[in-house]
């Protein structure tokens, strides 16, 4: 008791009831004012979730494919006109100490058709490559249907189709022992590969054995591409010595690449886009905060009589300020919660569509809610202080 009067108190339950008056009496306005916060938080959570899910998939791909695979291809000319690797390049590469395994493919001057009735010009962009059985192991590939070439099938008219090749030829099953027409010979399909993300040339090719390519299709060209699997810690060193090893006379005309660099470059580009989208989300969040502040200012003007009545009944300036500040935080918090759910839902839907694991960082969830509450507090501070300054007589004057 102070000066003979009871001290006015505002219990938490009373604060909640008074802070929800605006939302309960004007639900549409409350929903629209929270929409900006929801969009901003939803965008930021979705961007972070999709980025994290994408990175998880990238790490899984790198683990499957390995970062220790190098590809060697002929550059412009190799000093002999056409882009070709020397015939002895395979043996020379195999002599490099840290090299664990090698495999190669040879371009065969032939086209692949579903039947022998298709015009020659309609190739469908399908190439023919001659290779050996160790290719699949070198590129960490897998067979979707059937088997890969082996020492026996490599000497006979047998072919393994890349994933894109099989799709273009309309071959999904090997139950009927399908055959394809390679130039002037029939080859039986013994396998279909799963997609090779880092080797699109293999996806769009028909693979046959080296021996049958030489005997049946008159292929005697040198290797087109050499796949080199080396010890992980020696990748850079091996990449540096490969050009002079493959072609000592013209090492500058040998291209050595690491396929996984493509994924890493893609991830770097994704990081840039992530930062851009986060910026756009922050702008939407700022617009939402301004919208809440605007709504709260209008609410103070519209509810002057309510403020005056509460002040006349004993509510202090602090109670009025808490009421409107709480209402602003409530609007922003509800928008933030809806935004988190929206962002998580978008992440889950897209990850499911892409076949990724769904990962929503906890920092995105907690950070989104904290950011929404902070923006609500900042946006509601001025309207709350303005409402608190109204005297009972001024507020009740019409």
Image (cartoon, helix red, strand yellow):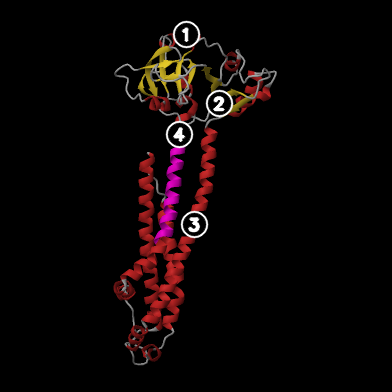
Q: Is residue 330 magenta?
A: no
* Foreground disc of the pair 3, 4: 3
Closer to the camera in the image, 35 or 358: 35
Task: Kindly identify which residue carries mark 4.
Answer: 61
Point out residue 152 in the picture as x, y percentages from the top left corner. 41, 9
Is disc 3 surrounded by few (<14), some (14 to 19) or many (20+) residues within 10 Å? some
Disc 4 and disc 1 in contact, CB within 8 angstroms: no
Quick one: SS at disc 4? Answer: helix
* Foreground disc of the pair 2, 3: 3
Q: CA–CA distance between discs 3 and 4?
A: 30 Å
Point out residue 42 in the picture as x, y percentages from the top left corner. 40, 56
Residue 47 sits above or below residue 195 on the image: below
Task: Kindly identify which residue carries mark 1.
Answer: 216
Q: Which residues are magenta?
A: 38-61
Q: Quadrant of residue 16?
A: bottom left
Count all numbered tags in the image, as a single digit.
4
């Amino acid at each position: 008791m102070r000066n003979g009067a009871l001290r006015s108190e505002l219990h938490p339950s009373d604060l909640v009831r008074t802070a929800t008056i605006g939302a309960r009496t004007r639900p549409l306005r409350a929903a629209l004012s929270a929409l900006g916060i929801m969009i901003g938080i939803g965008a930021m959570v979705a961007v972070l979730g999709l980025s994290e899910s994408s990175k998880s998939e990238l790490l899984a791909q790198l683990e499957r494919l390995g970062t220790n695979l190098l590809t060697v291809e002929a550059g412009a000319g190799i000093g002999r006109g056409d882009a070709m690797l020397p015939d002895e390049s395979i043996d020379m590469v195999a002599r490099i100490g840290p090299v664990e395994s090698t495999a190669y493919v040879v371009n065969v001057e032939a086209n692949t058709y579903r039947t022998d009735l298709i015009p020659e010009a309609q190739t469908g962009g399908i190439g023919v490559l001659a290779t050996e059985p160790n290719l699949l192991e070198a590129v960490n590939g897998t067979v979707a249907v059937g088997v890969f070439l082996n020492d026996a099938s490599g000497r006979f008219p047998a072919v393994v189709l890349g994933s894109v090749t099989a799709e273009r030829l309309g071959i999904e099953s090997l139950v009927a022992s399908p055959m394809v027409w390679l130039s002037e010979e029939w080859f039986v399909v013994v396998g279909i590969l799963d997609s090779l993300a880092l080797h699109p040339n293999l996806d769009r090719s028909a693979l046959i054995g080296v021996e049958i390519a030489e005997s049946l299709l008159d292929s005697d060209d040198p290797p087109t591409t050499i796949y080199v699997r080396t010890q992980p810690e020696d990748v850079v060193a091996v990449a540096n010595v490969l050009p002079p090893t493959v072609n000592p006379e013209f090492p500058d005309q040998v291209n050595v690449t690491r396929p996984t660099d493509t994924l890493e470059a893609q991830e770097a580009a994704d990081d840039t886009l992530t930062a851009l989208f986060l910026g756009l989300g922050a702008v939407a969040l700022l617009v939402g905060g301004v919208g809440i502040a605007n709504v709260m200012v209008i609410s103070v003007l519209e509810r002057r009589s309510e403020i005056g009545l509460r002040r006349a009944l004993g509510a202090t300036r602090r109670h009025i300020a808490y009421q409107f500040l709480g209402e602003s935080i409530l609007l922003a918090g509800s928008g933030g919660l809806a935004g988190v759910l929206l962002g998580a839902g978008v992440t889950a839907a897209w990850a499911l569509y892409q076949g990724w694991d769904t990962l929503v960082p906890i920092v995105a969830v907690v950070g989104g809610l904290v950011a929404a509450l902070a923006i609500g507090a900042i946006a509601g501070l001025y309207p709350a202080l303005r409402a608190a300054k109204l005297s009972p007589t001024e507020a009740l004057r019409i």
